[in-house]
Structure formats: C-alpha cells, structure tokens
Amino acid sequence: MRERVQEVVAARWFQRGVIALILVNAVLLGAETSPGLVASHGELLHTLDLAILGVFVVEIALRIYAHRGAFFRDAWSWFDLLIVLVALLPASGPLSVLRVLRVLRVLRLLRLLSAVPSLRHVVGGLFKALPGMASISILVSLLLYIAAVMATTMFRATAPQHFGDLATSVFTLFQIMTGDSWGSIPRTVMEEQPAAAVFFVLYILASTFIALNLFIAVAVEALEHEQDDVRAASAADAGPNTAGTEAIMAELRALRAELAELRAAREPADEDARAAPRP
C-alpha cells in the first residue's frame, strides 16, 4: 500500500495537479480582495478556498505516509508543512486575536517554490549567496553611514528637509541609492552649492553601480554553483544505471566472442565433411 502511495505522490500528473491548485488558489485569494466579488460570490469563494486547503492537507498527509521519516529530513517538506499549518490557524472564535493571520493564507502561493524544481534551485542558490551578500551589505552600510555623516555636515543648512540630521540623511541617501529622486535632490543642493555635484556623483557611482553589481555577481556565482551541484547529483543518480548498462554491454561482447569462437571451430569440420568422398 505504501509503495502505491509513493508512486502516486511521485507521479508527474500529481505534481502538476498540485501546481495547478496553487495557481487556482492564487486567483481565488486575489478575487477575495474585491468587495464586489465577495458580496456576490463570497460563499462560493470561501467554499472553494476551504476545498483547496483540504486537498493540500490530504497531499501533505499522503507524503508523510509515503516517506515517513524521510519527509521530516527534507527542508522543503517542512516548508510545505509549515505553510499548510499556518493556513489552518483559526481566524475567529476564542482565538479571534489570530484573525490577522487570515492574511497569511496568501503564503500558500509560496508552495510553488517547492513544487517547481527550477524555483527550488534558484532559492537554493540565493541561500548559498547569503554569506557573500551579508559581507557586501556591511560594506554598503558602512558607505551609507560615512556618506550620511558627510552630507549632514555639508548640506544641513542648504537642504534641511533632506539632510537636517543623521537619520534623515541616511534615508535620503538610501533613496538616492535606489534611483528614486536621484536627480531632483542633488539639484536642490547644487543650486546653492555647485561643488556638491562631485559628492553626489562619487556617491552614486560607489553605492549604485559598484555595490549593485557586486550583489548581482555574488548571486550569479551562487546560482552557477547550485546548477553544478544539481548536475553532479544527477550524474550520481545516473551512475548506477550507467554501470548496469556497461555490465550488460560487456556480457554482450563476451557472448559475441564465444559465438565467433564456435563458428571458427565449426568451419574446419564443415570443410572436412564437404571434402570427404561420397559412397
């Protein structure tokens, strides 16, 4: 029985069905944000949502039954289980404090990350990139702090709305780093301090172009390592099959060699039989 459940859970049609339900659930959750649709079809939307949640619960139960302890050794299985458990939290009654958790139903869409293998590889690569990104984040924070101290000192009197104190300067420079108002804010300062252009140009070059490209480089390198790991794992899985194929081919070659020897031994006997005089 357990083997049959394992075959069903691992079947491609089953996986595609789960992905389809996740996408349908996404559409339903989006529809529930429309007051008009909720007023006219609220009961139907709620019923469909509960039905899909029930299917997700059954799917998790089947996977636990099929894989038993292996289910809990897989991080993605824990991820799916946590998403479903959050969706099961009550949103009314004695635990009405948890009503805000109804919004967390949208987290069910994150199950696409575990259901689609390519998305799993991307997320795995991003997790591998976290140490490198943390180092770059420290570097960017240091750059932002130094620039904020300098900007507050130099431009406090000129543009107090943007550089009046250290916290305001940090927010303004972070805003410039994201590309928001990167032209209008420096121009406000440059109307009275034209030399401020040097500061802003150097800051934008260092924070936006250099730091952003470092983030991208680290992420790309981590994704490449993740793809290499996936290829290595695929090769390892295919290793026993390759070994079995090579063994079969070796046996076939041995059989062919034996047949060739038998034919070689038989040919002289046939020639002697043809050469013998007939009575």
Image: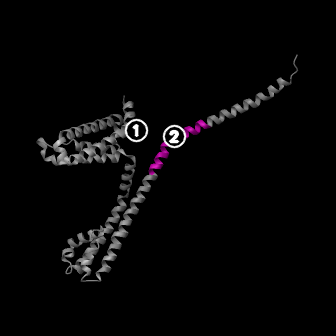
Query: Which amino acid lies under the numbered mark 2 shown in the image of this protein?
Result: Pro
Residue 254 on image: x %, y %: 66, 35
Q: Is residue 185 above or below residue 218?
A: below
Q: Which residue is mark 1?
A: 12
Answer whether residue 241 is magenta in the image. Answer: yes
Disc 1 residue type (three-letter): Arg
Please say whether residue 262 is visible from this viewpoint: yes
What is the chief secondary structure element of the magenta stretch? helix
* Disc on res. 240: 2
Q: Is residue 130 above or below residue 139?
A: above
Along the horizontal axis of the image, is 261 left or right of 187? right
Image location (x, y in percent) of residue 9: 36, 36
Can residue 75 be seen by looking at this rendering?
A: no
Residue at the top extreme, as displayed: 279
- The residue stretch that appears in magenta: 229-249
- CA separation, marks 2 and 1? 23 Å
Q: Of the numbered discs in the image, which one, if any, rests on residue 152?
A: none
Would you call the spot at circle 1 few (<14 residues within 10 Å), some (14-19), or many (20 or more)?
few
Which label lies toward us, 2 or 1? 1
Mark 2 in CB contact with mark 1 (< 8 angstroms) = no
Tell me where residue 210 sits by quadrant.
Answer: bottom left
Determine the residue located farthest toward the left in the rendered image.
94
Pointer 2: residues within 10 angstroms few (<14), some, or many (20+)? few
**Which quadrant of the figure has residue 267?**
top right
